Image (cartoon, helix red, strand yellow):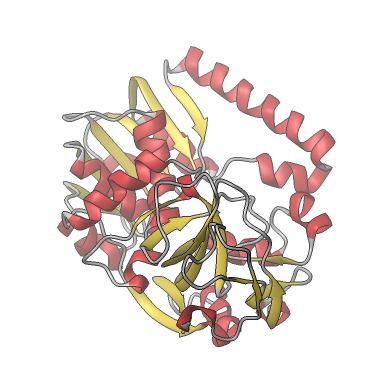
Amino acid sequence: MRALLRCRTSKFEHGSPFLAGFRTIVTTCRAVVLPHFGGPEVLQLRPDVEVPSLKPDEVLVRARAVSINPLDTRMRSGYGRSIFEPLLPVILGRDISGEVAAVGSSVRSVSVGEEVFGALHPTAVRGTYADYAILSADELSAKPGSFTHVEASAIPFAALTAWRALKSTARIKEGQRVLVIGGGGAVGYAAVQISVASGCHVATTCGSQSIDKLLAAGAEQAVDYTTEGIEFTLKGKFDAVLDTIGVPDTERIGIHLLNRGGHYMTLQGEAASLTDRYGLVLGLPIATSILLQKQLQYRCSHGIEYWWTYMRADSEGLDEIRRLCEAGKLKIPVEKTFPITQVREAHEAKDKNIIPGKVVLELD
């Protein structure tokens, strides 16, 4: 009954998909709640947050580790306000590693007791900063066997973001040249490793502290953007550019360095910021118009494809990511862990860039 510690339970009828053999389900659990936007001090660890009933395609996961992504700290500060403010309080968190506690009636891909890892989509309201999180079956895969829960929790959201850009959008192939602008962060580092594993020739930009790490990961060239002129130092043209920084200067450089027919993909699309500024009714059409204008502009002027990219669930992609992890071809180092009870301290450390690397929250 270890999985039910600190959680209220209720009886459930024989034959349900929930916790086979225990005849109980989780009804409430600890969770980190965001009641309103602000600094780390607004986060509240509550002991009895409701756990909703599972839908047929959903899985209840007993969390053991959840990583902190930039999206989490930005959401806490008000990013995505137009979407999330009417839904407050919400639970932050996207990544998770843990054990399956229960499955919906149509789930066949995972089973109770199995160790899994995965990530929720960016607009999920009930996140993973909780003893029990709910994900759809296609947002989960078996945890890499050689990884701890802490190590596994650092992978899915960042790797799936890179995977969607490189494999689903650009469809990179062996022998192509890939440029990752901002390879020192989790998404950039995952992108370098995925590109190398795909047989591509990879160049990247980063700070001086990340050069050795990225060269060791297989990048053929790592340019320190703080001391070198990127467009003058990088050699040749590229078939795909993933820009994790997404400011006007990196967009200009990335597009200039693309071959005709290449793909430029930025993580810093304007949809969320425009909907926050103008509301959903006006903001989304404005964002769509801007994206279409840029796509047409760059297609005509440079012969390239322009995309705003973001993470979305991809069960086949997550399975491939797991295989890369197990083969030793993909890993995102964890710099520090905090217990979930110190979530405010963890967010403060990320806000102040005291810990530039990956931070993971552990749940006992």
Q: Residue at x 40, y 27 (%)?
A: 263
Question: Quick one: which residue is furthest to the front in this view?
Answer: 14
From the viewer's perspective, is residue 139 above or below residue 297?
Answer: below
Q: Residue at x 45, y 35 (%)?
A: 265
Q: Position of residue 123 (x, y in %)?
A: 64, 50
Left or right, residue 55 beside residue 63: right
Left or right, residue 159 beside residue 6: left
Q: Position of residue 7 (x, y in %)?
A: 61, 81
Q: Position of residue 295 (x, y in %)?
A: 55, 22
Left or right, residue 342 beside residue 357: right
Please tell me which residue lies in front, 154 or 187: 154
Classify residue 50 by image quadrant.
bottom right
Report whether residue 356 is seen: no
Left or right, residue 283 beside residue 39: right
Report whether residue 165 is seen: yes
From the viewer's perspective, is residue 245 above or below residue 300?
Answer: below
Q: Residue at x 68, y 28 (%)?
A: 288
From the viewer's perspective, is residue 198 above or below residue 139?
Answer: above
Q: Position of residue 309 (x, y in %)?
A: 50, 38
Please tell me which residue lies in front, 9 or 79: 9
Classify residue 118 by image quadrant.
bottom left
Question: Quick one: which residue is furthest to the top in this view?
Answer: 300
Number of marks in the rendered image: 0
Q: Residue at x 57, y 59 (%)?
A: 134
